[in-house]
Image (cartoon, rainbow, N blue to C red):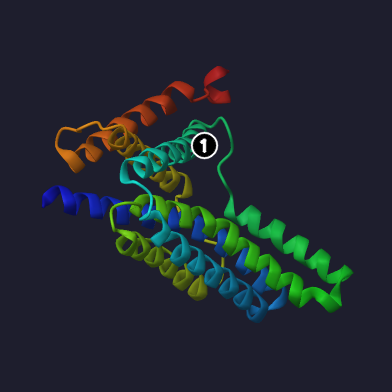
Amino acid sequence: MIGSLTHTGSIMTAAFLASLVEAVEALTIILAVATVRGWRPAGLGALAGLVLLVVIVVALGPLLDRVPLHLLQLVIGILLLLFGMRWLRKAILRSAGVIPLHDEAKTFATETAELRDQARRHEARLDWLAALTSFKAVLLEGLEVVFIVIALSAGRGLLGPASVGALAACLLVAGIGLVVHRPLARVPENTLKFAVGVMLSAFGVFWTGEGLGVAWPGADLAIIVFVVLFLAIGRTAVVVARRPSPEALS
């Protein structure tokens, strides 16, 4: 019972955090569209993107139940591990100062400038271009969320909890964005990506093992051990990769 609740809670948390990151990035572009052309094309484009994402989840979710469980766990486990390690690698390098942090304010300024340039060149078609920009932002960022939601719930009948976690994150970001009307530049995005990378990697190892027939000690509770392990490895990697500041070198 405890293991099952832990597993469900972990899936909801991973889906929530991953969706939070992607929703912040999508919101930045939607706000840029709204700033240049207004909320109507921005909202219509975003709504169309959300509808398509829902269709994808509804269509693909039941199909996964037809795949043999161990094969599904193995494939999804490997994909989650690769996906999580990619997020974790970038988060480690950004935390260590090897690559710059993602700047939502800079992205907002860039998208706004591009849309204004389009306005000068294609005034008659700007509403369609603005709506398409908003649509693409929601669709591209949302596809990663869809993959995570479907992968986390595959073979476990937990599409509902994973979807609830993702939907809660999207509603939270949308609500804040509508209130403040500005990019959420203060959201600790790299910290969130670090956490999502850790959790996805932990799930990836767990499900890859289950797909190979490994009987993990403690069953679902082993996920917590993997989370702690990846967290420790990630923090150690940040320390090792961290570049000394110019002041320290002088």
Residue 72 vs residue 125, the one in the foreground? 72
x then y, percent, for residue 46: 59, 71
Residue at (41% x, 60% y) in the render: 61
- Which kind of residue does numbered mark 1 sit on? Lys
x and y percent of residue 104 in the render? 58, 54
Pointer 1 local density, CA inside 10 Å: few below 14, some 14–19, many at least 20: some
Q: Is residue 186 visible?
A: no
Q: Residue most toward the right?
A: 121
- Work out whether residue 43 or residue 59 is closer to the camera in this orientation and state it: 59
Q: Indicate the position of residue 48 as horizontal and vertical percent values.
A: 59, 73
Query: In this orientation, which residue lies closer to the viewer: 249 or 95?
Result: 95
Outermost residue on the bottom side: it is 40
Which residue is labeled 1 in the image?
A: 90
Q: Residue at x 14, y 37 (%)?
A: 218
| Residue name at image x 39 percent, y 31 percent | 234
Total label count? Answer: 1
